[in-house]
Amino acid sequence: MSLACNDVFQIDDRLQSEWWRQWREHQRFPDDYLCLHIIATDFDPLTGLILEVGICQVRNQEVAERLTWALDWAGEPSLSINQHPSPNAVPARQALDEILAVVRAALGRGEFLVGHNLWAFHLPIAHQHWLNRLGEMLEINGSQVLDTGLMEKASQIEAHPNDHTDLEEFWSSVRDRRAVGVHWSLRGHCVSKYGLVEDGTSPQPSLADACLTHLLLEKFRSLCG
């Protein structure tokens, strides 16, 4: 199904239910995974700076560990940024190195990396930071990713992963589609639509959104029956 930029969609709950049924038949939901959420000055990989990262480690579908980093860019002489980091902020390169180690360990265990708009925004800027600041490359492909934002978007426009050769192609295809009337924002759309309730134990915005992403993925699991 080819979508033009001015396609207008009236969201059909029945068709969305069918989408989730088809997802269940062709894909799986992992029990163990890592939810990642990034807050940045902007999400252009070439200009944006990561300010905060939250990670929610999930085991057997339950939160097992919460991690968060506030990045302090003051020690980077090549940057001119008017930043007021939190008292708990750590040097940016140290934080990036620690985050990369956590992500690599999860992928090494065969776990999925989960995030809301992860494929669209968060991974590209993280990749650029790891490469430019640490000289490191993260080997990851779309088959190890679940992007809850793109899943919500795909369910509204009837884009099915089984129509593509692999999940990486699917994520990229859905990311690049534009359609009027389609919404997938985590807080602006998914929280109210799916009745997600925060537990209040994650005051840092990045960690709170990582934990919300966990709740959303588990809601999606329940929709698949």
Image: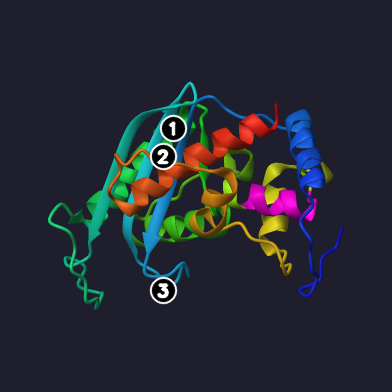
Sequence-wise, which precedes: disc 1 or disc 3?
Answer: 3
Quick one: SS at disc 1? Answer: helix
Q: Amino acid at mark 2?
A: Val
Compared with 189, 14 (above or below) is: above
Label 2 with label 1: CB-CB less than 8 Å: yes
Drawn side of residue 122 relative to residue 4, left or right: left
Residue 106: numbered disc: 1
Residue located at (49% from left, 37% from top): 215
Residue located at (71% from left, 56% from top): 174
Q: Which residues are magenta?
A: 150-159
Q: Estimate how packed mark 3 is, as few (under 14), some (14 to 19) or many (20 or more) residues with alpha carbons within 10 Å.
A: few
Prevailing secondary structure of the magenta residues: helix
**Which residue has dot 3 on it?**
47
Determine if residue 164 is in view.
no
Residue located at (70% from left, 26% from top): 225
Determine if residue 196 is in view.
yes
